Amino acid sequence: MRYRIALSLALAGCAMAGQLPAQEPPLSLADAEKIAIQNHPRVLAAENEAGAAGKLVIEAKSAYLPQLSADITGSQASQEARIGAGTLPASSLWTRFGQGVVFSQLITDSGRTTNLVANSKLQAQASQEDSRATRYSVILDVNRAYYEVLRAQAVLKVAQETAAARQTLYAQVDTLAKNKLRSQLDVSFASVSLSQAKLMVIRAEAAIDGAYAELARALGEQQVVRYKLVDEPLPPKPPDQPGDLVAQALANRPELAGARLSSGAAHKLEQAEKDLRYPTVSIVGVAGFLPLINEESHGRISPAYEGAAVNVDIPIFNGHRFAARREAARYQALAADQRVREWQQQIARDVRTVWSESRTAFERLGVTAQMVKQAGLGLDLAQGRYNLGLSSIVELTQAQLSVTQAQIEDLSARYDYQSQYAALQYAMGLLR
């Protein structure tokens, strides 16, 4: 009986919990950035690509180390036969089964492997910079989506307050009209104004849905979660001139650093291709045994074997293949140099453009704050004049609309500036 009572209480508690409204989990901008870095597929893909590039360094270094392989060979041949066409050495044919190992070690290839290793290291470093650039781009997207949600929430609050105020006005005007103190024309204007406010609420709610969907995409989440976002303080005023900002951007932007590393890698590859025209020296060794040989060969062939040789490969002519590879690598290096120049120009342009937009967004803050103040004074005057019968309801509803527009402009200016400042930090390579 006691267990039944406990089970009933537990089920009742679960039912009550299911009826309670779900609490929105809090989320700060810093936490949102951490979630995106951990979850976003672009970030994870870039990290995997950087990891793959790092393994290519080990692959290039493998030429320095000895190469050892084991072989098992069996053959069936006709007795006393010889190969008559297709090859020059080892024309004899005989039945055998053998096991052995093959050893080879590069002594020198005139610096080609050294340049290839340097190329792979620079490419790995460039891939790391590309990964860092991807993280910064994702963080910028998070900032923009975060402030867009805050803007949409603030606009919804203004729309709801406007709808509530116009609902009150409509009720007052309707009551006055029923007592023959106001005309039905005033009721009609108040009703239209209330309907406009309700439409504003509907649009604001739809904008919030879209803003949360964009935030989920920026965070790399599959499901849309309605977080309770923490408002961020306004950043400081942008600098008066963009010159120092451009210099910082050229020193900090990971895209430019990656382009420079890629250019260095291209020049190392060019040098490696030039080294193809020089000799390559290597040591080759073999050892093994022949457990099964035919009777005819038993007296002439030792059951065990070993041997070593030094091989010098001197390229003489291969149909201009090495020359073509060398020229192709040279053109690729020149192209990489031009891409560095392009990044420098693009970054300088981006910084100046975003700086100008940030300055404009900052200046809007003071203008919109003054607009809200003046619109509030105008609404107070219009309300007083309407109450005294000195003006029509059109003047009052227009004053209400001006206040709503001023509030929305002020909110937009605030979050626009925060978003633009984040874009400026990104353009300078300082967004973390």
Image (cartoon, grey):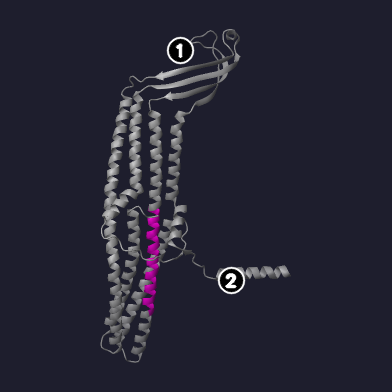
362 versus 168 height, above or below? above
- Tag count in the figure? 2
Q: Earlier in the sequence, mark 2 or mark 1?
A: 2
Image depth: mark 2 or mark 1 in front: 1
Helix, strand or loop at mark 1: loop
- On the question of residue 121 being in view, the answer is yes
* Dot 1 alpha-carbon crowd within 10 angstroms: few under 14, some 14 to 19, many 20 or more: few
- For residue 285, above or below residue 259: above
- Residue range of the region highlighted in magenta in the rendering: 137-164
Identify the secondary structure beneath mark 2: helix
Q: Indicate yes or no whether the magenta region holds residue 157.
A: yes
At x 41% / y 19%, what residue is drawn? Answer: 312
Distance from the alpha carbon under mark 2 to that under mark 1: 90 Å
Identify the residue shown where x is 55% and y is 18%. Answer: 287
Which of the labelled discs sits on residue 363, or is there none? none
The dominant secondary structure in magenta is helix
67 left or right of 235 in image = right
Query: In the depicted view, which residue is nearer to us: 73 or 431?
Result: 431
Residue 296 point in image, percent of width and height: 58, 8
